[in-house]
Amino acid sequence: MSHSGRVAFVTGASQGIGRACALKLATNGAAVAVAARNQEKLSELVKEITTAGGSAVPCVLDVTDEEQVKVSIKAVIAQLGKIDILVNNAGITRDQLVMRMKRADWDSVLQTNLTSAYLCIQQVATTMLKQRWGRIINITSVFGQMGQAGQANYSASKAGLIGLTMAIARELGSRNITCNAVAPGFIETAMTEVLGEEFKTNAAKQIPLGRVGSVGDVANAVAFLASDEASYITGHVLNVNGGMLMG
């Protein structure tokens, strides 16, 4: 799967799944604009990509700020000429039982995980429509499909991404723009690292493949959906969960 000549914009790219997606797309030949709030981590990622012979630019950005999103995407298009691939990966958790959940924690999760995807899609849509080619990939979650106690805000945001994916697929499909979602299950990241080894061991027992996933597993799925080989797939949720949820 070659992404040579393509330009990708990846949010939440400073670590975890977003970082893996940026590296994978760059390895496959895409120029990648990596967006996140942490400038230091972005600089390290850009250096890693360029040292390996790839092309990348940092984009320090708070995806919940509409004006920052507008300015940043315009700057990327001005610098790299276009955006072909958008990966909406930025996400946070603020876990708590719903009876105790603070409104601020509900709002921050919805704004970061769901509203940011709408903002980014809105800004890249014009350039994709003009070139009549685009790939939009939203990173949702198995918990947006089956729910999770203590994560009402997170599950709601990820379920919302699935609905957004399908709506955008219908709106933009006639212009050769696809919109799909990738739904990871339990993935080894900094976000899950704090859960402890016992939790991970018990989680693996619930997964038919008998292991938790890697960020590379998710990046491979994203790379496929961003490719020409996936040109007849849109409005789809690709599960990357080791069989944790089927059907």
Image: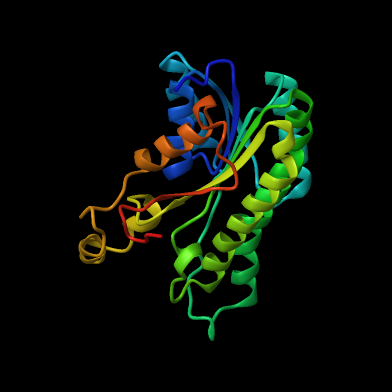
How many tags in the picture? Answer: 0
> Can you say which quadrant of the picture contains the C terminus?
bottom left
- Residue 62 in picture, x, y percent from top left: 65, 47
> Which residue does the image show at 60% across and 47% down from the upper left?
235
Quadrant of the rendered structure where residue 61 is? top right
Q: Is residue 163 left or right of residue 182?
A: right
Residue at x 43% of width, y 16% of height? 51
- Asked if residue 14 is positioned above or below residue 77 in the image, the reply reads below
**Image quadrant where one finds the N terminus:** top left
25 to 55, vertically: above or below: below
Find residue 165 and report its horizontal and vertical position in percent.
Answer: 62, 50
The answer to which image quadrant residue 218 occupies is: top left
Name the residue rendered at 35%, 41% in the picture: 217
User: Left of 143 or right of it: where is 126?
Assistant: right
Residue 32 visible in image:
yes
Task: State whether residue 22 is above or below residue 150.
Answer: above
Q: Residue furthest bottom?
A: 99
Please give the name of the residue rendered at 37% of the width and 61% of the height, measured from the top-left corner: 245
Q: Residue furthest top?
A: 53
Residue 169 in the image, given as x and y percentages of width and height = 66, 45
* Image position, residue 88 (x, y; %): 59, 44
- Report whether residue 124 is seen: no
Q: Is residue 126 left or right of residue 188?
A: right
